[in-house]
Amino acid sequence: MTELLVLSFGISFALSAAIVPVIRHIAIAIGLVDSPDAERKLHSRPIAVAGGVAVLIASLCSIVAIYFVDRVAGWSFLPDTIPNRWLVLLGGCLAI
């Protein structure tokens, strides 16, 4: 199971590293940014605020990939005692 957790982390990390710059570029292009002001926001330039979307996409892709690895390789990522365990995991990911 440790191998599966490391694989899941590696997939999520790699996808996040690849997707964040793309989402950042899109967010800046469509104006989804936090602009500096004189009171609280002291950053020097507008900052994209859609990073969570990139992390969500990477996490969902990782869960789907591990689901297929679990089915093909027979590794057990989640206990069999949870009914619809993959739907529960996806639902929790979306809720967070």
Image: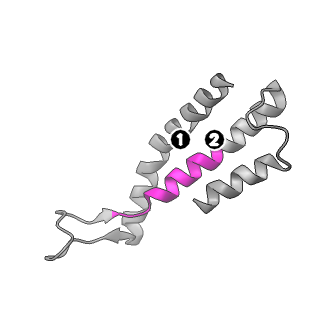
| Position of residue 49 measured from the top left corner of the image (x, y, whole percent) | 39, 64
Q: Amino acid at mark 2?
A: Ser
Residue at (59% x, 47% y) in the render:
59
User: Based on the displayed image, in which of its 4 quarters is residue 51 positioned?
Assistant: bottom left
Residue under numbered circle 1: 15
Residue type marked 1? Leu
In depth, the one of 52 and 21 nearer the eye is 52
First in residue order: circle 2 vs circle 1: 1
Q: Is residue 71 magenta?
A: no
Rendered residue at 63%/24% (across/down): 2
Of the numbered discs in the image, which one, if any, rests on residue 73? none
Q: Quadrant of residue 43?
A: bottom left
In the image, the segment drawn in magenta is 48-62
Mark 1 secondary-structure assignment: helix
Question: Looking at this view, is 78 or 11 the one in front?
Answer: 78
Spatial CA distance of label 2 from label 1 is 8 Å
Q: Which residue is mark 2?
A: 62
The quarter of the picture where the N terminus appears is top right
**Count of numbered circles in the view:** 2
Q: Quadrant of residue 40?
A: bottom left
Q: Looking at the picture, does residue 95 appear above or below residue 20?
A: below
Question: Along the horizontal axis of the image, is 33 left or right of 39?
Answer: right
